[in-house]
Structures are given as C-alpha cells and as structure tokens.
Image (tube, rainbow, N blue to C red):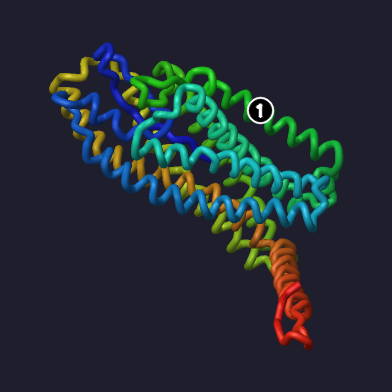
Amino acid sequence: MAADEDFMSTDTTGIISTFDTTFDPSYYSENYVDEVCDKTKTVLFGSIFTPVFLSIVVLLSLFGNILVIVILAKYENLKLLTNAFILNLAVSDLFFTAGLPFWAYYSVDGWNLGEAACKIVNFVFYVGFYSSGVLLILMTAHRYVAVMNPLSDIVSTSGFYSVLASVIIWAASIIIASPAFIFTQVVGEKHCVFASSYWSLVGIYQQNILFLLSALVFTFCYCQIICRLVRPTARRRKNKTLKLIFTLMVVFFVGWAPYNIVIFLKSFSLWKQQPVVSAVSAAACEAETPLDYAFYVCRILAFSHCCLNPVFYVFVGVKFKNHLKKMLKRRAQNTSNIRSRHSRLTITSVTSGEEFSV
C-alpha cells in the first residue's frame, strides 16, 4: 500500500495551501524564489534519491509479481479463495508499480504529460494502493481463521465466492480511489496536483485510516496466531512460522508507520491560513526541512512493499517454492532439448563436404 504526497504553498492567493499527490521536484524552487522557504536542497535530494530507488523497486516488483501470476496460472487452482487473494494481490501490486516510472520521471523533469495522463496515472496508482491494503487485511484475517478454526467453511471457500470477493475488493478500491481521478489537475503545466486542499486532506487521512485498520488487524490476528502456536500441541514447524509472522509484522510497521506519521504531520500545513511571508512562516519552514527529507526516505520504504509482498506472502511457502523449482527445472530441460535437437539437425554433406544447419 502506498501513495505519495508532497506539500507546498501556492503563490496564487498567498494564503491557501495545496497538496501535491505525486512527486513535484520543481514546485518549491519555482514558488519560493525570493520568499521565505527555500526548498532547493530538499528538492534536489528528492530528484536524485527518488528515481534511483524507484527504478530498483519497479524492476523487483515486476519480476516478483509476474512470476507469482505465472506460477498460479500453471500450477494452482485459481478458484480457491487463498489463491484468488494471492492472484489479486499480485495484480494490485502491478497496478501500483505501473505509476512509479511516471513519478520517477516527474521527480526529475516535472509533469509534462498532460492532464488526462495526470488523472489516469493517479487513479491507477491509488487503485493499486487501496486494493493492496484491503487484500492484506483480508489475507491476514483468512490466515487467522485457518489457524484458529481450520474446519471453517471460509478456509475452503472456492468458486463463486472467490469471484464475488474479488469483485467487491476491486469495486471498493475503485470507489475509494475515484477522487484521485476526478479532483487532480495539472497546474502551471508541470505540476500534477489535487485541485483543493480539502481533497488533499481526504487523500492523507484515507491513507492514515487504512494504515490504522491494517495495523489493528495485523496486531490482533498475528498475536492470536502466535499464542496458538506456542502451545505444546502445536506442530513441529511452529518456530519457522513464528519467525515468518514476526518478520511480516516488522516489515509492515517499519515500512508503513514512518510514512503515515510523516504525511500526517505534513497535513498540518494544509490547515494553515497565514501569509507565506512572515516570521512565523520562516520558522515553520525551517522546522519542516527535516520532515521533508524524512518524507523522501519513508516514501521509498513504504513503496518497496509492492516488491516485498511476493517474497513474504508467496515464496516463503513450501508449495510455491516447489512450483518454482519445478518450473526452473522444466525450463532447463527445454533449453537442453533445444540444444540437442539443434545439434542433431546439423548435417554434414558427404558429397560436398559442406556443413549446413536445418
């Protein structure tokens, strides 16, 4: 789950703050020339730091999530609810990842792709973000039920109910993400932003609410699962499972807690209704500098979740490891067969002494 938001004050009214839904490296430097806030250093830091790490995240996410989809399609029953969740999570992460190259480019050169692209990219990005968050909550709850009540009908649900769950998840994500399509616009031909501070605040607090809900579900479900696993009657593999659960919780909170704290603190600037040029604004601007740097770093930590999901939710399982080994072994055999076939088809002409390949 992720979204990315940057904060700035406009120079159109002098008092109304606006909120950048994406990466806006040049807005500060253009709007704070000869004013109180000089964001040149933080913007330069973001324009260098962001593209490098986002490129790594994009490559890892594409590789991991596409591999998950291929393995599911080849070896698994997609009608099972568990597999439907994993498939939808991989697709959701790919939606989220699809927006990252645009934001990487935006962080270097500003937005020059037009308003239609601004709306579409934001919408696809937020659909991936919200659907990923919802899916992680449902997968955690499903795992909780499977451990606490393995005979429950929910554990073995398949067919129609898997399709229905998928439809509800995507419909809800599209509805929640719709403000990103309706209320974003291009300002000054280089800035893809929300049209008003109101919708900027809505975007921030939606993310905060989703994080808090996810944190509550994670903490409750995994603590209950841990309590069940530490019982003497638990299975032998409990130590490995406990390590996995602990890792999941650490990665989740390290990735998302700092990011949500930073964007929440930054949202206070949207409530300010004072002129930009003032002693108070100067002090506030100076105090925000560490927060600006923290924002760039915490955002990358949060966004990296899209490439970590396949690792922690899929490939740690024995079944998927075996599927991967089988697929790699089959690919190696196919490569070997092609080479041997090619060598057999190499014919040497006895009469002419010429060698040619068929």
Residue 52 is situated, as x and y percent measured from the top left of the image, at: 39, 51
> For this rendering, which residue is in front, 352 or 188?
352
Residue named by callout 1: 172
Quadrant (top left, top right, bottom left, bottom right) of the C terminus: bottom right
For the point 21% across and 15% down, the residue is 275
6 displayed left or right of 283: right
Quadrant (top left, top right, bottom left, bottom right) of the N terminus: top right
140 displayed left or right of 29: right
Give the SS element for disc 1. Answer: helix
> For this rendering, which residue is in front, 126 or 47?
47
For the point 62% across and 36% down, the residue is 131
Relative to 315, does residue 288 appear above or below in the rendering?
above
- Quarter where residue 154 is shown: top right
Residue 26 is situated, as x and y percent measured from the top left of the image, at: 29, 32
Q: Mark 1 is on which residue type?
A: Ala
> For this rendering, which residue is in front, 288 or 56?
56
Residue 80 is situated, as x and y percent measured from the top left of the image, at: 81, 47
For the point 39% across and 30% down, the residue is 111
Mark 1 Cα-neighbour bin, 10 Å: few <14, some 14–19, many ≥20: some
190 displayed left or right of 352: left
Give the total number of marks visible in the rendering: 1
Which residue is outermost to the front? 352
